[in-house]
Amino acid sequence: MTVVIAVVNLKGGSAKTTTAAFLAQAFHDAGLSVLVVDADPQGSLLRWADGAEWPMPTIALPARTLHMQLRGLAGEHDVVIVDTPPLDSQAGIVSSALRAADLVVVPVAPTPMEVERLSAVRDAIDDVAALRPDGCPPSAVAVLSRTVARAASTAVWRAALVDDGWRVLGAEVRRLESIAQAAGDPIQQTGPYAAVASEVLDITLTIEGASAA
């Protein structure tokens, strides 16, 4: 069973592409067959993959019909990672990705502005429920990214997200130059994303089990 993971946020600059890239590499390193889909018309992920000669196949699919095309493209891959465009400028493409997704991963920095934006992301996730075969929204998790070591605010915003009903991964991604400057280069070390991928994999296994039941 292929698991489709969509990486989503309201705005650009929220580490969507970086998260998609590092998760894809982490899943590949774990021995899974991964297909990477760049659904952003800007094509940043595809250029990164081509320039760095990623070991995972990467395709461009910036289409509002992504949900209809994706299953035929997934083939025998274990995981499909979809990097989406900003929701505020390409809602149709993001909605299509959400219709196809088994799990939505939302990278968010622990700041007031980024946390506030998540209400629009949640609305988009809820809105696709009526368009999905099961009539339910896809499962979603938040990943704290670009965190600062020993910053007390991280725990505060983590608690705020949980109180607001978000499932927040225990693993978080520190603000590291090796990650911030990674675009365009081969990903040789996934660092904190290895732990993020492990948690995401556990969640997807739970989703698969529930679907089989």
Image (spheres, rainbow, N blue to C red):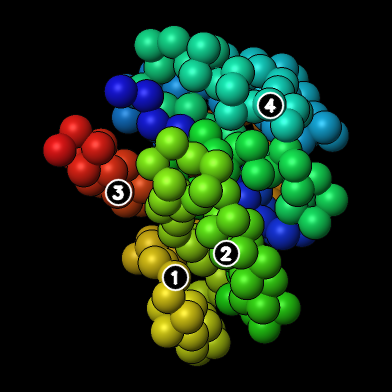
- Asked if 58 appears above or below 111 in the picture, the reply is above
The residue furthest left is 213
Residue 5 visible to the viewer:
no
Where is residue 93, by image quadrant? top right
Quadrant (top left, top right, bottom left, bottom right) of the N terminus: top left
Say which label, 4 or 1, has the lower sequence index: 4
Q: Which residue is mark 4?
A: 65
Say which label, 3 or 1, has the lower sequence index: 1
Q: Which residue is mark 1?
A: 166
Nearest to the eye among marks 4 and 1: give it: 4
Q: Which residue is mark 3?
A: 203
Q: Secondary structure at mark 3?
A: helix
Nearest to the eye among marks 4 and 3: give it: 4
Residues under numbered marks 4 and 1 in contact, where contact means CB atoms less than 8 Å apart: no
Spatial separation of the CA atoms under disc 2 and disc 4: 21 Å
Q: Which residue is mark 2?
A: 122
